[in-house]
Image (cartoon, grey):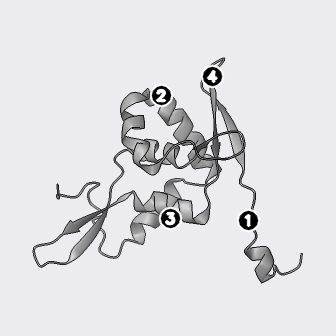
Amino acid sequence: MPLLTRSQLLQKQDLKIQKIMLDEKQFVYVREMTGTERDRFEATLLKLHELPDGSIERKQDLEDFRAKLAVFTLCDEKGKLLLQPTDYGKLGDHMRASILSHIADAAAELNQINQNAQEALEKNLPSAGRDGLHSDSA
């Protein structure tokens, strides 16, 4: 297998798309994220918290994790994303938890988001508040 060239590395890659059956009749598609989408998704899992000394602390925030993951992966049959990043709140408020979990589980598997990936995200926080999930800021 030869070393990839610059042009090969910069060539748009096909993303895997997976059909997820929600019941006997209804289904959705989820897809792999690009590197940029993955970074943006992970950024939504952080909250900034200003400390009394004026420094900023980043803490992991898993609130709406499933809805955020669904928003970054739900797509049509051609892989075009269906939702905007700002749609996660509404999606989480309106969709049944069992369905949202089913979608998020499939998306996590397809995008290799597992406990190890979540732990790596947490370890990479420079001044991580690893003891809590939410910041104290409003």
Q: In which quarter of the image is residue 53?
A: bottom left
Q: Earlier in the sequence, mark 4 or mark 2?
A: 4
Report how far apart the C-alphas of labels 2 and 1 lie in the structure: 34 Å
The residue indicated by pointer 4 is 26
For label 4, the SS is: loop
Up the image or down, 37 lies above or below 7; here it is above
Residue at 41% x, 43% y is: 88
Which amino acid type is marked by label 4? Gln
Q: Are marks 3 and 1 in contact (CB under 8 Å)?
A: no
- Residue 32: image x %, image y %? 64, 52
Q: Which of marks 4 and 3 is nearer the N terminus?
A: 4
- Residue 111: image x %, image y %? 61, 53
The residue indicated by pointer 1 is 12
Q: How crowded is mark 4: few (under 14 residues within 10 Å), some or many (20 or more)?
A: few
Residue at 57% x, 47% y is: 73
The residue indicated by pointer 3 is 39
The residue indicated by pointer 2 is 98
Residue at 72% x, 50% y is: 16
